[in-house]
Structures are given as C-alpha cells and as structure tokens.
C-alpha cells in the first residue's frame, strides 16, 4: 500500500505532488488527499471548483521499469487517464448509494458522470526527473455540494447526496489508492482489455456526438475509445476517424 498523507489546508494536491516530484523530494510512490482545495486544477489548467465536501486525491509514482503494455507500440504513450477513469468508477460502484451507482459513466476523455451530470474527473501528467519517468494522477470527486454552485456548474452533482450524512468521502481513499497502485505496479497491462472495460462505462458509445477542437467540428456516432486512448468517431459517410486526448470537447447530441 502506498503511503497516504492527508492535507488539511492545500491549494491543490496535484500541484503539491508535482512540486515534490520535480524537486526530487520523492523517491517512491505516494498519495496526497484533501477534502477541499482552494486552487484545484482540472484539464488544460482550468480551475477545479470545490463542492465543499469532496475528495481531492493525487498520486505520484515512478514508472515501472519493464512494464509491458500489450496492444500498443513502444512509442505510443499509454492512455492513463482512460485507464484510471475505469479504475475510479469500478471502486465507486460499490461504495456509493445504489441509485447513484446505477448512473455512473465515463465521458471521454476524463470526466466521471452520475446520471449524465459531472461528478468528478481524472488528470494525469508525466514528468522526467533525473532520467526517471514519473506519473502524477489527480482524482477529483464531488461528495456533497455545500457551497453555492458557480455559473456554468449547475449541472454538477454530488455522489453522496443520497447517502446518510455520516457517510464520508474519506471512505473511498484507501480502495482508490489500492486500485491505482495495482495498475501502476502491474508487470503487464492489456490495452485492448482496458478499452473493452471502458466501453462498459462509456456514456456516449453508439450515440450521436459532436467533437469540437480548435480547428474542426465533427459530427458522427461514437464508437468508443481505442486501446491507445483515442476516441473513435463514425462519420455520416461511413468513415471512422480517431482523435487524441488534448484540447477536444465531446458533446452528446440531443434527440
């Protein structure tokens, strides 16, 4: 089990973990956890807004020498955001109220949904320090909204809003850390199996979607996530295109 440090007052557990790795103050895997952040970050540097009773969990680990990823070429970066999204929902599905668990889903590339509303997200960054590759993963989850929701976040939801008041987000910490550690330390990972697991939770697979990027707008039907983490989209003319993680936004099309 990786050591877990609780941060009572922190701007961002993710930035703190990155700082420790960059400064060479970490040699082995570790996890930082807080129930609230004052300056959390999300995808592409956007702010992560605290719900008042949530979970901010950041994990950092040196990449395992010799870890084999089946189904990907050696020069293809493993899609850790996709893999960790699956790990998170698999942990949550047995640890949140059944009504909420029934609505768990993943929205490519890194959102965790509950009945179609955003409930969390995953952020993964790679670092190289003194020749050693590191991964830093941030997992942000909404437990209960106890502060006014800012404009633009009225659609967000808390995973424990149907639970007894005594239920705590801290109950998720150990199983989440263990799930990430098991994957990070696995001698071999099957990228195709991971892609298949993601499909079971995919919020938009088989549905009409719109892909928005800085230079294009594509409409089609989602065919899920490829083993390399790219989204597969079938266009109206039958062609299947893929798009990588990056400044891309996926939107479902209302019926």
Image: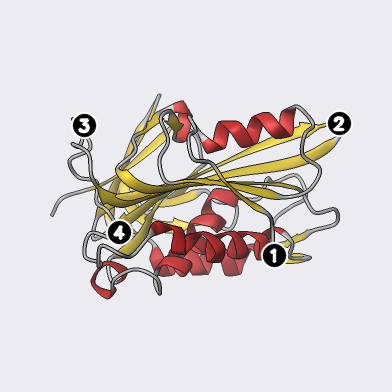
The structure residue drawn at horizontal position 40% and vertical position 40%, both measured from the top left corner, is 36
Q: How many discs appear?
A: 4
User: As rendered, which of 240 and 5 lies closer to the eye?
Assistant: 5
Q: CA distance from mark 2 to mark 1?
A: 26 Å
Callout in the foreground (3, 1)? 3
Question: Is 142 located above or below residue 131 in the figure?
Answer: below
Query: Where does label 1 land, which residue?
Result: 189
| Contact (Cβ within 8 Å) of mark 4 with mark 2 | no
Query: Where does label 3 land, which residue?
Result: 150
Q: CA distance from mark 4 to mark 3?
A: 18 Å
Percent coordinates x, y for residue 248 in the rendering = 41, 35
Query: Where does label 4 land, which residue?
Result: 159
Q: Quadrant of the N terminus?
A: bottom right
Percent coordinates x, y for residue 25 in the rendering = 77, 34
Q: Quadrant of the C terminus?
A: bottom left
The structure residue drawn at horizontal position 33% and vertical position 59%, both measured from the top left corner, is 203
Q: CA distance from mark 4 to mark 2?
A: 40 Å
Q: CA distance from mark 2 to mark 3?
A: 41 Å
**Mark 3, secondary structure of its residue:** loop
Which is nearer the N-term, disc 2 or disc 1?
A: 2
Which is nearer the N-term, disc 1 or disc 4?
A: 4
Percent coordinates x, y for residue 23 in the rendering = 75, 27
Task: Please give left or right for residue 255 compared with residue 159 in the image.
Answer: left
């Amino acid at each position: 089990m990786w050591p877990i440090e609780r941060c009572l007052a922190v701007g961002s557990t993710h930035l703190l973990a990155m700082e420790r790795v960059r400064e060479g103050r970490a040699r082995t895997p570790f996890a930082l956890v807080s129930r609230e952040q004052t300056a959390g970050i999300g995808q592409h540097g956007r702010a992560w807004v605290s719900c008042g009773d949530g979970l901010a969990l950041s994990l950092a680990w040196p990449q395992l020498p010799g870890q084999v990823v089946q189904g990907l070429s050696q020069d293809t970066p493993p899609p850790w955001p996709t893999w960790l999204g699956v790990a998170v929902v698999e942990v949550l599905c047995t640890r949140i109220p059944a009504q909420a668990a029934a609505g768990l889903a993943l929205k490519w590339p890194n959102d965790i949904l509950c009945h179609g509303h955003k409930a969390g997200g995953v952020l993964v960054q790679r670092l190289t320090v003194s020749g050693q590759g590191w991964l830093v993963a941030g997992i942000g989850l909404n437990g209960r909204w106890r502060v006014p929701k800012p404009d633009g976040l009225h659609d967000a939801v808390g995973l424990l809003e149907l639970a007894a008041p005594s239920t705590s987000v801290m109950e998720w910490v150990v199983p989440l850390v263990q799930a990430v550690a098991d994957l990070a330390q696995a001698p071999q990972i099957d990228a195709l199996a991971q892609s298949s697991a993601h499909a079971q939770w995919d919020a938009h697979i088989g549905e009409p979607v719109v892909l928005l990027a800085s230079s294009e707008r594509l409409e089609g039907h989602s065919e899920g996530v490829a083993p390399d983490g790219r989204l597969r989209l079938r266009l109206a003319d039958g062609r299947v295109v893929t798009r990588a993680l990056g400044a891309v936004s996926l939107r479902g099309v209302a019926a």
